[in-house]
Image (tube, grey):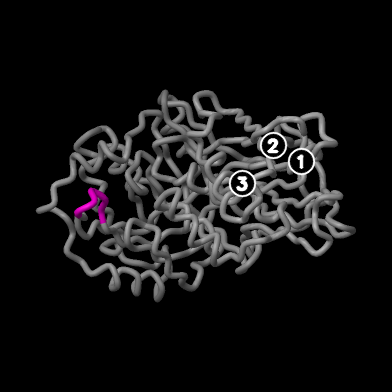
Amino acid sequence: MKLLIHKSILALSSSIALNGNTATAWTSSLHQTQTTLISSSRASSSSSSLLFSSSSSTESAESLDASTSTSTSASEYDLSLFSPCKINLFLRIIRKRPDGFHDLASLFQTIGFGDMLHLKLLSSEDDDGDCDGDIFECNMEGVPTDKTNLVIRALDLVRSKTGNQDKFFKANLIKQVPAQAGLGGGSGNAAAAMWGANELLGNPATLEELVEWSGDLGSDITFFLSEGTAYCTGRGEIMTPVEPLQDGTKVCIVKPDIGLSTPEVFRALKYDELSTVDPEELLDTFMKNGAAGAGEDAYVNDLEQPAFDCIPELGALKEELKTVEGFDHVMMSGSGTSIFCIGEPKDWVAFEKDFSNRDGLNVFPAEFISRKKGVW
C-alpha cells in the first residue's frame, strides 16, 4: 500500500498580524498548523483567536515554513481556524435508547491532524456581498457544499440563535480528514464554524451557549468546543471536561481507503457481547496513568468487533500494527475505519518499507493537542 506520511499539515504561508500582534502557531517535527484571526474592519479590536496547541511544540508564526501553503490565500478571509480531529481512547456502548440512539461513555482526545476552515463575514462592499446566502467551497471531492454540509448548518444555527438572520458568510474548507474514519472530521468542522461565526458576529453567544446549541447538529460536535480532552456520555453530546492528557503524546493514525458508516457498524453490534467494564473506572485509569501508561485492558471499543465483522481485513490490520515496535497501544477509533497507534515506530524506515507497497492505506503521524478554555 502507498504510505502517506503528512509531514506538514495545512500550514499558512506566512505570519499574519492580529491588531499589531502575531498569531501563534501549533507545530511539531511532523506537523505544522496555524490558527489566525486576520485584522479587518469587521473584526473586534478585542478579539483574539488562539489555537489547539502542544506545549512541547508551540512556536511563533514566524517560524512556519514559508514554502508551505494551502490552496487558498488566508488573506482573503477574516478568520482561519484549524479544525482538529479526535480519537476515542475508550468507547463503551451502554444501551440502545427508545429513540433509536445509543447511550455511550467515551474519552475523547483531540490530535494535531485536521482541516483548515477559512471564514469571511460578507458585506455589501464585497464582490460576493450581493448574495442572499452563505458561500461554501471545499477542496475535497465528494464533500457536499449545499445545506446538508455541517458547516453550512452550523452557520445557520448560530445565525438563527443570535438573531443575525441578515448576516452571511463565505467559507472555504481545506480538508484532509477522510470521511467514515471514526475521527469526527465533519463534527470538528461544524464546531469551528460555530466558533468562527460567533467570533465574526462580535461574540453574541457565550461558550456555554455554543456548547448547548451544538447538540442540535450532532453528537460529537460538543466535544470539539472543549479544551481537547473530555469524557462524553449520552449520545456523546453530554460533555464532562477533564484534565487534558499530556500534550505531545505521539499517535499514528492508519486509515484504509475503505470506509464504514456508523449505522452499518451499529447494525452489526451484538449487545450480549458488549464489555461490562465500568467506564468510570476506565476514565480513572487514563487520568492517573495517561494514554501511554494505561494498561491494555483500558483500551476498550465496543464498536471494534462489529466493524471487524463487517471488514475482517481491518482486524488483520490491527493485529499487524500491534507487532510494530514502538506502538504501546493499538485500537480502532470510534466506528472506524481508522486505527490509532499510541507511540511511534522505533524504526520509521522499516515501518515505511513494511507498508509502502500496499495500495489503499494512508498513515497520518500526529500528537495529542489541547487549548485553554475560551480560546480556539
- Find the residue positioned furthest to the left: 272
Compared to 191, does 149 lie above or below? Answer: above
C-beta proximity under 8 Å, tags 1 and 2: yes
Residue 221, image x and y in percent? 47, 52
Residue matched to label 1:
77
Element type at mark 2: strand
- The part of the chain drawn in magenta is 98-102
Q: If you read the primary sequence from the N terminus, does the residue marked by circle 2 or circle 3 appear first?
A: 3
Crowd rating for badge 2 (residues with CA inside 10 Å; few <14, some 14–19, many 20+): some
Question: Are the residues tagged 2 and 3 within 8 Å (C-beta)?
Answer: no
Q: In the rendered structure, which amino acid carries the disc numbered 2? A: Lys
On residue 170, which mark appears?
A: 2
Image depth: mark 1 or mark 2 in front: 2
Work out which quarter of the rendered image holds the C terminus and state it.
bottom right
The answer to whether residue 78 is visible is yes
* Residue 176 pos. (x, y %): 55, 36
10 magenta-colored: no
Cα separation, mark 1 vs mark 2, equals 8 Å
From the image, tell me which residue sits under label 3. Answer: 30
Is 72 left or right of 145, judged from the image as shown? Answer: right
Between circles 3 and 1, the one closer to the viewer is 1
| Crowd class of label 1 (few under 14; some 14 to 19; many from 20; radius 10 Å) | many
Instruction: Label the magenta part by its dominant secondary structure.
Output: loop
Residue 22 appears left or right of 108: right
Residue 133 higher or lower than 184, as above or below: above
Residue under the point 66% across and 59% down:
57
Q: Where is residue 32 in the image (x, y as percent from the top left)?
A: 67, 47
- Above or below for 244 versus 64: below
At x 26%, y 63%, the residue is 297
148 vs 341: above or below:
above
